[in-house]
Amino acid sequence: MTLYLIHSGWGKMKILLDTHAFLWADSDPERLSPYAQEVLSEASNERLLGVASLWEIQIKEQ
């Protein structure tokens, strides 16, 4: 599981989630580290998901 953090000033971060991090944040947040949970819960942070993750999720659903 990977979170890529990019500081964008004024305490905000852009967070690029991999597929597992995205799925766990949505359905099973206890699987994330305490730090990842904290970063994702901060309302001012921007959460991003790569296009490839949408493809991976579709494959997992099938």
Image: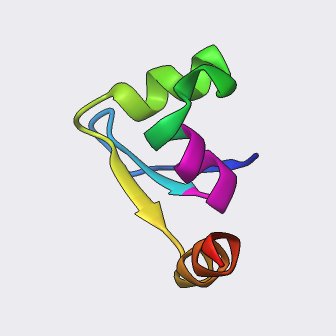
**Is residue 5 among what the camera can see?**
no
Q: Residue at the spot x=48%, y=67% of the render? A: 49
Q: Answer left or right for 1 relative to 36.
A: right
* 41 w.r.t. 62: above or below: above
The x and y percentages for residue 7 are: 46, 46
Q: Residue at the spot x=60%, y=84% of the render? A: 55
The x and y percentages for residue 2 are: 72, 48
Instruction: Give the residue furthest to the top.
Output: 34
Instruction: Give the residue furthest to the front.
Output: 62
The one nearer the camera, 6 or 9, is 6
Is the C terminus in the top left, top right, bottom left or bottom right quadrant?
bottom right
**Which span of residues is magenta-colored?**
17-24
Display coloring: rainbow
* 52 w.r.t. 21: above or below: below
Total of numbered circles in the picture?
Answer: 0
The x and y percentages for residue 22 are: 54, 51
Q: Residue at the spot x=52%, y=83% of the render? A: 51
Magenta stretch: helix, strand or loop mostly:
helix
